[in-house]
Image (cartoon, grey):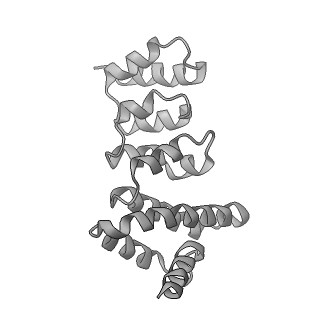
Amino acid sequence: MEELHARRNDIFTSDIYKYLSLENILSIYDLIKHHPEYLQIMRYLLKRRLENIERQIEATVNSLIIEKYKAEMRAVYNDGIADIEFAEERLNTKDSGFRALLNEVCIIIESKLIPAGNIFFRDSILPQEKHKILSRGLMPRDLIQTRLEDTDVSQEERKILYDYLKQNRA
């Protein structure tokens, strides 16, 4: 039985939409969310799986893999596979091209895993990511104004915030 579990784990973490299609992966997540006893195992395996997918994307820049990766990551957050620890680890990665590629900051906010204000005030979030948060209407006006009061906000971010407030006068 241990050998079977090891093989299952190996296929899940190393296969990139070949033996396990995107539909298979999404079905697994859909089932797992209803079985908390397997959720911890899935979270452990997920990190290795994503590392392998991201390595493949960096090596090949294959648009089909990128689109499947985006859909998988939306499911990871929306199906509750990701926990706060997972999201925090992803958010604390400086200059994450994958986070930007996925628009992951907005996905985290929309999944209600971490509140928008908690993410918006972080310096680890790029100004472009904050622009996406604003463009989706995920940030209340008063919090935007509060952010502008911070003297440590970069010029780039400050411009994005002022422009947004100017274009969206209440």
> Can residue 71 be seen in the rendering of this structure?
no
Q: Residue furthest right?
A: 59
Residue plotted at (26% across, 68% down): 34
162 above or below 71? above
Residue plotted at (38% across, 60% down): 81
Which is more toward the observer, 156 or 11?
11
130 above or below 52? above
Residue plotted at (39% across, 62% down): 75
Quadrant of the drawing holding the C terminus: top left
Percent x, y for residue 43?
45, 62
Which is more toward the observer, 98 or 12?
12
Residue plotted at (59% across, 20% down): 154
21 above or below 96? below
Residue 153 figure quarter? top right
Percent x, y for residue 159?
53, 20
Label total for image: 0
Percent x, y for residue 138?
34, 36
Percent x, y for residue 60?
71, 67
> Can residue 6 be seen in the rendering of this structure?
yes
